[in-house]
Image: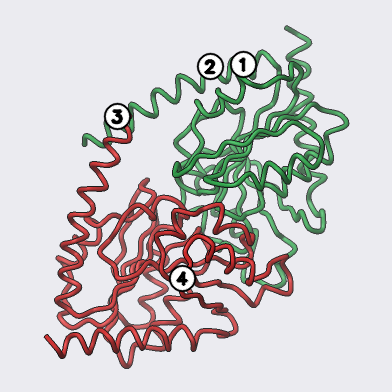
Chain colours: A red, B green
Amino acid sequence: MKRIDVQRKVVTKNDRIAAENRKIFKGLGAFVINMVSSPGSGKTSLIEATVKALKDEANIFVITGDLMTDNDAARVARHGIEVSQVTTGEACHLDASMVAEKLETWKSEKCDLVIVENVGNLVCPASFDLGEDVKVLLISVTEGDDKPIKYPPMVRASSVLVISKIDLLPYVDSDPETIQANALKIQPDMKTFRISCKTGEGIDQWIDWLRSQLETKRRIRERL
Amino acid sequence: MKRIDVQRKVVTKNDRIAAENRKIFKGLGAFVINMVSSPGSGKTSLIEATVKALKDEANIFVITGDLMTDNDAARVARHGIEVSQVTTGEACHLDASMVAEKLETWKSEKCDLVIVENVGNLVCPASFDLGEDVKVLLISVTEGDDKPIKYPPMVRASSVLVISKIDLLPYVDSDPETIQANALKIQPDMKTFRISCKTGEGIDQWIDWLRSQLETKRRIRERL
C-alpha cells in the first residue's frame, strides 16, 4: 500500500513537470513524440530515417534515453542535427524532469519537431508523461503478434502504432493484421503504420503523416 | 532520496522472501531458472523446447509471468506438465512473493527443474531475486548487438546468456560474436549458448548443460 502511495506521489510530481515541458513545447510550436518500445524494436533506425527525410524542411531536436552508452545519440548525430543523450543508470524509463533538464541547456530557439527516444521497455515508460503530443509505440514483427494484449498499459497510453521490421515477414511467424487487430482491441483510435527501415517500405506514409502534424502546428503558430 | 530508500526497503523485503523460496527449492533438490529477456526474445519457445526434451526424465514445474493474458502458460501446458500463471497487472517484474504464493498452492512433491518465465523486460527484473539458482538471459539476434552494454544491470545479474533466433542471422545485421563479446565485457564468467527454437540448432547443447545441472542437484540430494 505504502509502495503504491509513493508511486502515486512520484507520478503526480512527474505530471507537474510534464505540464511545464508541454508549455515550453507549445511556446516553440513544436510537435513532440515520445517513442516507446521493447529493446531493439528499431526506434533509433526510425528516428534516423525520419531525420534524413525531414531535416531540410524542419528543425529537429532528438533526445535519446538509455541506461548506459551514447550509441543511439551518436547514430542520430551523424545526420547533422542536435541530439542530447540521457543516461539513466538503472532507471527503467525517462521521466519529465530528465527532459526538462535537457530543455534548459538546449540552445535552439526554433524547433518544429522533437523526438524523445525512451528507454527500451514495454512496461514502465507507459506511466510517465514527458509533455509529449503523442506516444508512438513500435512493435517489430519478430516480437510475437500477441504483444499488444500482453502489454495493454503501453498500448492504452499510445496514439500511434508502428509495426516495424516488415522486411523480416517472410522469415518469421507473424501477421501484421493480428498485431494491429490486437492493438485496436485496446486502443480503437490508434493510427497504425507498417515500416521497414531496411527496405524503406512504409516510410513515406509515416513521413507524410508527420508532415501533416507539423503543418497543423505551423498553422497554430501563425494564428497565435 | 526518499524514493531510493523505499526502493531499498522493497528490495530488502524481497530478498528475505527470496531466501525462503531458496530454502524450499533446496529442500526439493530442484534446479531453478529465472528466465529474463526483452519482450519477444523467445523465452516461451525455449521453455517449450526444454520441456519437450526433458519431461520424460525430470519433473518440471513452470511459472509464467505476464502483465495480462495466460497465453504463455497455455502454450507450455500443452506439453502436459504443471504450469502456473502470474498475472502482474501493471507490475514490470516478478517478485519473490509472487513465486512464494505459487509454491504454497503447488501440489507436486517431487521436482527436479523449476523454470520461472519473468515478465518481458530487460531492466526491472534484474533487481529482484526470486530464489533461483541462475538467471538465464535471452537476447535475440534481431535486437541489436549492443544490447548487453546498453542494459548492463541485467547482464551483471545473469549467469547464462542464450543468443536466440539464430535462424534469422542471414536476414539481420547481427553478429553473435559481438553480442557475446559485449556480454562478457560485463560478466566475464557468463556461460553462453546460441539457439534457434525454429530449426532446433543449439538446443542439444542447452539441454546437455541443463542435464549436468540436474545431475549435480541429484548428487547433492543423495548426499543429504
Depicted B99 relative to depicted B142: above or below: above
Residues under numbered marks 4 and 1 in contact, where contact means CB atoms less than 8 Å apart: no
Residue at 39% from the left image edge and 57% from the top image edge: A66
Q: Chain of mark 4?
A: A
**Where is residue B144 shown, x and y percent of the image?**
55, 63
Q: Earlier in the sequence, mark 4 or mark 3?
A: 3
Question: Left or right of A166: which side holds B51?
Answer: right
Disc marking residue A190: 4
Q: Amino acid at mark 3?
A: Lys
Q: Are marks 4 and 3 on the same chain?
A: yes
Disc marking residue B20: 2
For numbered disc 1, what is the local secondary structure? helix
Q: Residue furthest top?
A: B224
Give the labeled residue for mark 3: A2
Q: Chain of mark 1?
A: B
Question: Left or right of A57: which side holds B21?
Answer: right
Residue at 49% from the left image edge and 89% from the top image edge: A204
For numbered disc 3, what is the local secondary structure? helix
